[in-house]
Image (spheres, rainbow, N blue to C red):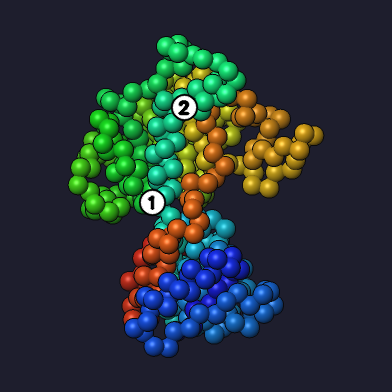
Amino acid sequence: MRILLAYEMAPATLAQFRARLSAELSGFEGWELHDWPGSDEALAAQLPLADVILGPKVTPEQLMQCQRLQLWINPWAGVQQIVGSFQQVRADWEAAQGRPLLLANSHGNAYQTAQHGAALTLALCNQLARHDSAMRRGEWRLWKDDWPSTPLRGRTLGLLGYGHLGQHIHRFLSGFELDFIALKREWRVETADAGDTAGLRPLSRRYDSAELLQFCSASDIIVCTLPATPATEGLIGEAQLAALGPQGLLVNLGRGSVLQEAALYHALREGTIAGAAIDVWYNYRPEADAQDRLYPYDAQAHPFHELPNLLLSPHRAASPLEEPSRWDDVVENLRRACQGRRDFLSLVDIAAGY
């Protein structure tokens, strides 16, 4: 089985990945890993020979060259940058090859991403960044309680998205006396696949996409883990934030595009909601301003950095990038491919975009 890297891995990451494959695929003969060939031109010669390809991007033209492809693995969870090519050529590719075109993503960093999300939730509830900044300015605010904490006991935490991330966060925060609700595009019989469910507080209610306003109104704290798809673009706007209410808190670990930028800024500035913690943003190639500052949003129209009720995080929830467990589901899918299996983990619904 020929495994092809269709992107350039950092040397340390590649060494870790090679060592992992050597250890875990040692019982299978005939597999070989081919590194990124160095250019798109050189890649073109490799694509028709590969059985499994790992990469975060592909053009429709490149995908049509993948004649032996059994599985394409996106090495991260987000597939918005690649799934369009699969949608565009899927019918033609499957007609030509006589088998399904399969795309999987990776949730190997879900645990540490959810850990960061839980940390943001607790830091937001306890106003940690605000108190830290005040002490660094020399303000000794002993017993002053004009920035009170939000006790979790008795509150309702709404999980907007209930995939790997949402389920991990549910488990991490179940030690608090919270009521949990969740909204998911499609509910199946199983409700949790994020590991040990011992001590997991039950979901008191499940919502579907048509019940978004009711979900927001029922939540005291919303943790969003939704991916970027046409269905989630701008999903949270003025009406949803107003439904969350003036005591409500919002944490976003999913994609920035799910929250309307202007609506979020004005809701925080005007007190429509009490606060937010954001790890995902709107512009990932910002231009420096006159003071050589880089802000991943429209800093002129929406100066989020000036808002005292916002906790900012630079899309770093998946850290550390070299965490060995980040390859767990990728390696398992490669093992299944070596076995000739097609029951791959984390297959993407290409039509739905996630």
Determine if residue 212 is in view.
Answer: yes
**How far across and down, in percent of the image, does residue 243 sit?**
42, 25
Quarter of the image where one finds residue 108: bottom left
Q: Would residue 310 appear left or right of 250 to someone viewing this image?
A: right
Viewer-closest of 59 and 90: 59
Number of numbered discs present? 2
The kind of residue tagged 2 is Leu
Residue at 53% in and 46% down: 316
- Residue reaching furthest to the left: 198
The kind of residue tagged 1 is Tyr
**How far across and down, in percent of the image, does residue 331 sit?**
40, 70
Viewer-closest of 6 and 233: 6
Mark 2 → mark 1, Cα distance in angstroms = 23 Å
Between disc 2 and disc 1, whose residue precedes? 1
Above or below — where is 9 with respect to 25? above
- Residue receiving disc 1: 111
Q: Residues within 10 Å of mark 1 (few under 14, many from 20)?
A: many
Residue at 43% in and 55% down: 109
Question: Of helix, strand and loop, which one carries label 2?
Answer: helix
Q: Would residue 109 appear left or right of 168 to someone viewing this image?
A: right
Determine if residue 235 is in view.
Answer: no
Q: Which of marks 2 and 1 is in front?
A: 2
**How far across and down, in percent of the image, does residue 17 sit?**
48, 70
- Residue reaching furthest to the right: 290
Residue at 48% in and 83% down: 32
Query: In which quadrant will I find the C terminus?
Result: bottom left
- Residue receiving disc 2: 128
Residue at 39% in and 88% down: 29
Above or below — where is 304 with respect to 230? above
Say whether marks 2 and 1 touch (CB < 8 Å): no
Above or below — where is 92 with respect to 259? below
